[in-house]
Image (spheres, rainbow, N blue to C red):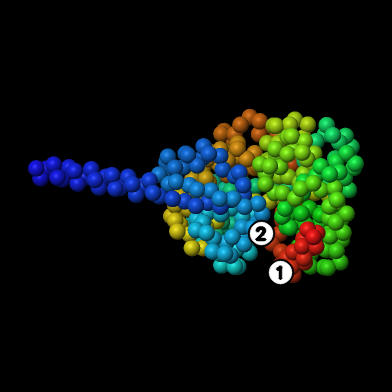
Amino acid sequence: MSKLIVAVGASLSLGLAAGVQAAEQLNVVSWSGYFTPQILEKFEKETGIKVTVDSYDSNETLLAKLKQGGAGYDVAIPSHQFVPILIQENLLERFDPAQQPYYANIVDNLKTPTWDPQGAYSVPFIWGTTSVVLDTAIYKGPTDSYDVLFHPPAELQGKINMFDSVSEVVDAASVYLDIPLCSEDPKQMQQVLTLLKAQKPFVKTYSSKAGSIRENLASGEVDMSMFWGGSSMRAREMKPTLKYLYPKEGVLAWVDNMVIPKGSRNPENAKKFIAFLSQPENSAMTQNFLKHQSPIKGVEPFLDASLKDAPELHIPEGTRVVFSKTCGEGSIRLADRLWTNLMR
């Protein structure tokens, strides 16, 4: 009898342990459509941790979410220029990833970068460029300048999407006008506003939602959009006449980073997730899905053949590449005022 009781007790405790394991959770907030279901399933299978993903469509939205208390998020994926802002606002947990073995996998020029010089708060997740994609079946003219976006020809007017992100739109306009990024000069910002106001009647939508932009480009709802390189490749796979531009003025570059928001309820699970995504095979799964560039060494054997020669992922030699910057308060205030004025 006592042996039976012990056996039942043991099976109950094992059942409870399994229940606890199944209840392990991780709440992630990221740019929309950043995770393939397969990678989340693989992580859950390896760790027993269930991942829930929420999304945002601009860094400004993420900043607002985290300032309001973070809604219990354990991992977020801000762009590099927002990392110092989140650190300064005391919205991130310090977890010193640079001390972890997986940090050795990161490509050398993204280790301890300017936005996180000690490698204390962030790990690169994916990087790439921001430019313009357009349908060459509709427009046959020159594609070597942002002119086509900011002074669109008749065939593209009313069929344009611009990002719904102050920083990205202002940065693109600044590169075109040869104005320094994060300008605090009201006259220079007035030039940017004048340019964007003149363009506005020809803009159909302001959206940063990658999935809807791709679908709208594929269906012909829009024929030109600001877009990211990897997202443009995914759109071209749906519609081969789409072309990603490398304007003579330059392209913007960005790095999206994994961070742990302050007050995370599952920080150990967050660290496991970040370590998991930093392994070459898993980072390659992300790159195969998103098509952007991986920041991890050793992904090549795991990449799809289509990525090897994709023009969207290979920046032509001589192209000016401009990394977005962390703007000061004066610049942010000017840009916000500009955006409010533009959206009236």
Res 66 quadrant in image: bottom right
Task: Name, please, the residue furthest toward the left.
Answer: 1
Q: Nearer the viewer, mark 1 or mark 2?
A: 2
**Relative to residue 201, is residue 236 depicted above or below?**
above
**Relative to residue 11, is residue 270 depicted above or below?**
below
Label 1 – label 2 distance at C-alpha: 14 Å
Name which residue lies at 39% across and 49% down: 23
Task: Say left or right for 157 vs 304.
Answer: right
Residue 182 x, y percent position in the rendering: 76, 62
Residue 97 x, y percent position in the rendering: 51, 55
Q: Amino acid at mark 2?
A: Glu
Q: Amino acid at mark 1?
A: Glu
Residue 87 x, y percent position in the rendering: 58, 64
Query: Would you name the residue on which mark 1 appears?
Result: 329
Label 1 or label 2, whichever comes before in sequence order = 2
Label 1 residue SS? helix
Query: Would you name the residue on which mark 2 appears?
Result: 60
Considering depth in this image, is 308 or 34 the residue closer to the camera?
A: 34
Considering depth in this image, is 62 or 92 the residue closer to the camera?
A: 62
Residue 178 x, y percent position in the rendering: 85, 56
Name which residue lies at 50% across and 48% down: 52
> Is residue 334 among what the camera can see?
yes
> Is residue 318 among what the camera can see?
no
Rate crowding at label 2 as few (under 14), some (14 to 19) or many (20 or more) other CA atoms within 10 Å: some
Task: Say left or right for 253 vs 137.
Answer: left
Name which residue lies at 66% across and 59% down: 60
Name which residue lies at 19% across and 46% down: 9
Q: Quadrant of the C terminus?
A: bottom right
Task: Name, please, the residue furthest toward the bottom.
Answer: 330
